[in-house]
Image: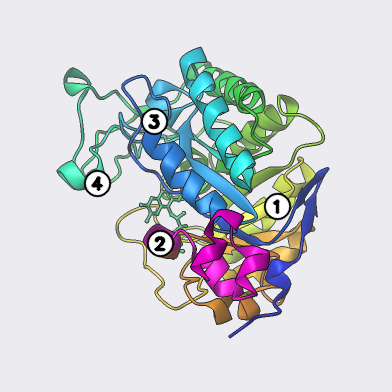
Amino acid sequence: MATASTAWTAIQLRELSIPNRVWLSPMCQYSADEFGAPTDWHIAHYGARAAGGVGMVVVECTGVAPDMRTTARDLGLYTEKQVTGHQRLAAAIRSIGSIPAVQLGVAGRKSSHGVPWDNAGTRNPVPPDEGGWQPLAPSPIAFAGLAVPTEMSTKDATRVLEDIERAARNAHRAGYEAIELHGANGYLLHEFLSPLANHRTDEWGGTLERRMRFPLQMIEALRASWPEDKPVLVRLPAEDLIEDGLTTDDMVAVATRMAAAGVDMIDLVSGALTPAARRLTEPLHNARYGPRFRAAGVPVAASGLVSEAHHLDEAVPELVDAVLVGRAMLRDPYWALRALDAEPRQTWPKQYHRAF
Ligand SMILES: Cc1cc2nc3c(=O)[nH]c(=O)nc-3n(C[C@H](O)[C@H](O)[C@H](O)COP(=O)(O)O)c2cc1C
């Protein structure tokens, strides 16, 4: 059934006009080459989704430094070879018909593990002598069976901020139009925010106000090294879904401060700090937090079980300003065009018109 959802209307973030509000959610492909650069897989995978009608393609979590990747097969944006590969990828996404964006990853303690299909992913730590690395985190508290991370020193923290700055400059040189900083799913920014992962006693630990200081420095570093006219998104947990973890009130306060620091859109997920976090399983589960986050004063997006066309009508604009679709678009690169269900000759790539 055809939908007239607001999801198909444009949205403006700074100087970037995005033609619709149905975007590809960042999803690690664990298919980088040995130098952390995009491969033919990335061109084919993202190219197909760009042809599939999404307003913006958010390229997967891309490490700002070798030890900020989750696995050795993650993409990076810290070498010239990687920048060259990303230039090709961003250009392909643009020329095929979508807006190229990239998610920057700062993995923290949830890193140096196997790829999901080889070794059960995060349940399989990869030590330094087998091609892994020693993870850094706010506090020496391990994620499940992964290595106990090294507590970050002030010097480490300065280095991470410099890594973010370099990755942002490289993302601009690669031709990306928007950056999303990964601040959720139990990675470094989330670890600093959550009292369950941050036991520091210095200026970066203690009250929520203090725990959000380093995350805000990460945002400031990113904003300062990324063009004024291009938007910054941040992916945040709407709550930890664990007893004594971050609450939605906490996260609305964090989102509000991040918006004041120059973030243009909040992208909501939930949980994932530890394996004990509850998992939400209803359609649109993260989008349902959206109205609370409007208090931050910037547009809000969410991913999480948007898998049927009618979910778009339910989500936009009542709950959120845009949706990111993940697994449904792994199953079907043309999910957005099918959901739009308009006259195919006006929406599908012209190369395919004879199919209709
Ligand atoms: C294979 C796979 C890889 C993922 N990689 C990332 C990632 O790189 N960064 C991220 O923020 N989320 C990642 N996610 C989470 C998705 O972006 C999305 O938030 C989640 O799957 C929920 O949306 P969905 O129900 O539409 O799939 C990944 C999910 C899958 C299935």
Boundaries of the magenta span: 329-356
Distance between mark 3 and mark 1 Cα atoms? 29 Å
Residue at 64% across, 67% down: 345
Q: Which residue is mark 3?
A: 39
Q: In the structure shown, which secondary structural element does the residue marked by tag 1 occupy? A: strand
Q: Residue at x 43, y 30 (%)?
A: 38
Mark 1: few, some, or many residues within 10 Å (few <14, many ≥20)? Answer: many
* Numbered circle sitting on residue 344: none
CB atoms of marks 1 and 4 within 8 Å: no
Residue 339 falls left or right of residue 131: right
* Ligand 1 found in image quarter: bottom left
Q: How many marks?
A: 4
Hey, which quadrant is residue 330 in on the image? Answer: bottom left
Residue ID for mark 2: 327
| Residue 169 seen by the camera | yes
Q: Amino acid at mark 2?
A: Arg
| Label disc, if present, on residue 265 of the rendered structure | 1
Q: Residue at x 37, y 67 (%)?
A: 278
In this view, the residue in front, 100 or 315, is 100
Could you say where residue 46 lies in the image, as x and y percent from the top left?
Answer: 48, 45
Asked if 298 appears above or below 81 in the picture, the reply is below
- Of circles 3 and 1, which is in front? 3
Is 348 magenta? The answer is yes
Dot 1 amino acid type = Met
Please rate how many residues cluster around mark 2, counting C-alpha atoms within 10 Å: few if below 14, some from 14 to 19, many from 20: some
Residue lying at the far front of the rendered structure: 354
Label located before the other in sequence (4 or 3):
3
Is the CB atom of the residue marked by disc 3 within 8 angstroms of ligand 1's nearest atom? no
Q: Where does label 4 land, which residue?
A: 116
Q: Is residue 188 above or below residue 341?
A: above
Secondary structure beneath label 3: loop
Q: Secondary structure at mark 4?
A: helix
